[in-house]
Image (cartoon, helix red, strand yellow):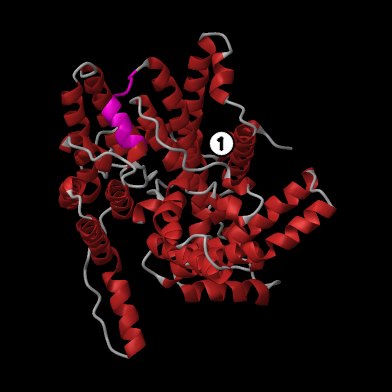
Amino acid sequence: MWNIDEFLSGLNIDLDRLRDVFTYDPQAPMIFSSGIFLWLFVAFILVYLLLQRRTTARLLFVTLFSYYFYYKSSGTYFFLLGLVTVCDFFIARLMAREAIPWLRKAWVVLSLFINLGLLCYFKYTNFLGETFASLTGGTFTTMDIFLPVGISFYIFQALSYTIDVYRGTIEVERNFFRYALFVSFFPQLVAGPIERSGNLLEQLRKGHDFCFENIRYGFLIVLLGYFEKIVIADRVAAYVNVVFNNYEAYGSLQLILAILGFSVQIYCDFSGYSHIAIGTARMLGIHLMDNFRQPYFAMDIRDFWNRWHISLSSWFRDYLYIPLGGNRCSNIRHYINILVTFLLSGLWHGAAWHFVFWGGIHGVYRVTGEILKPLRRQIERANPVRAGGHLVKCFITFGLTSFAWLFFRANSLSDAVQIIRNIFGDAAGHYCSEWGMDGANITLLLLALIVLILISMAQERNISIYAWLNRQEKWFPFVAYFVFTILILIFGMWGDSYNAASFIYFQF
């Protein structure tokens, strides 16, 4: 029979590790789960509060803090962020003054050339060189090129601004520091959400409130993010990493569990970061766009991409898929547009063929869904889908996305293929006893997943936990926040399986 004392002792909780989290280490990288960020953010909030009535000083302060945040993440490569900012700011100004259409187009092409050129050099030089060498039978010496953290995110954000100015959908920004803050705003700088100028830049222009209500609501969102990241994602990563890095030693069931585990890990890891970013920004009075809306409740692949990494999927829709022709063309051209969009989305995620293959799989899913759409509608009209049918659709969609995640997580395309062979060729194969977690941590993980599912179900039904807390006695929300914080710290960070991993999307 399950015993709470045995469970807690099995976690091997060591509260002395609290010092590691709350210790100011200037050499540590600047990530949301580091002690240096905690202390600097507290200091930042105090100064931000003092500058509440000084708009220009506050704008400059937040911009400088954002650059320091990025400096602690990528070192001297913060100059690259500055280069992108300066180029796009003045290109947009020149483009806004230009009345000749072809010159306006020339300016936006220059912006595309600079931004995508920098992205290709830092992220794709080795990949393109190795691919060309393999096709031609030549040799290529891998170059030692550092990939700056978040370069894919802030370059896409900067590009959205210059393209929108070219299209005339937004006004050109004339305050350099305001535009610099738009590109470098620290909560979402290194892993999104990829904000549009029509949202973030407009808020910076109009000003924003710093009030206690925003702090309370933002802190609750931040707590949800930390719960997803350190209680679930980092814990399940212990098992996923062990299996994927030594998949030859594991049997079919363990490999399938690792694939499903990665589906959970990548969602909780990236959704966790997005919630921390959104909550941190809300504390400052800034409303960032939602990046996830319960994606594993989606009933088809199209619905999944309307819920998953919304800022990126909408970026590709608005700046690639629609300009290619979208669905305003022949069916064949429409299907090609879908495939091209998803292939490039896969390449955006990583300079390796297994990422491209992952994007291609989703492209095939989407095209197949478009082709079968008339048949599906006929079936649904003949037999209306009820609650059970919705659940079946969710499970099918989750299964399809989990299969695709295999190619995303595998160390190479050949590894992914071999894992599939091992699953179907070794159904009764040998099983390794190394799971990366003990029984207590597995129990804790399962309980945390149940809590997350319940929270997601409430969100799916538009039930606000924040509103519910506010309806209770005035003291109750404060006690609840305190208890949530303590539980996340204890059950998230202090156990044998805890591994303070960086966020997955930092590598993109």
Q: Quadrant of residue 282?
A: top left
The foreground one among 265 and 447 is 265
| Residue 158 seen by the camera | yes
Question: Left or right: where does residue 39 sit relative to residue 353?
Answer: left
Residue at the extreme bottom: 137
Q: Quadrant of the N terminus?
A: top right
Expressed as whole percent of the image width and height from the top left, the position of residue 247 reads: 54, 69
> Which SS type dominates the magenta stretch?
helix
Residue at image x 48%, y 59%?
241
Dot 1, crowdedness within 10 Å: few (<14), some or many (≥20)? Answer: few
In the figure, residue 261 lies in which quadrant?
bottom right
Residue 95 vs residue 37, the one in the foreground: 95
Q: Residue at x 32, y 91 (%)?
A: 137
Q: Is residue 496 visible?
A: no
- The residue at which mark 1 appears reads as 9
- Say above or below: 17 vs 152: above
Seen in the picture, residue 433 relative to 421 is either above or below; the reply is above
Q: Residue at x 25, y 55 (%)?
A: 148
Please provide percent x and percent y for residue 3.
67, 34
- Single out the residue that lies furthest toward the right: 382
**Left or right: 10, with 134 as reference point:** right
Q: Which residues are magenta?
A: 199-210
Asked if residue 323 is positioned above or below residue 162 in the image, the reply reads: below
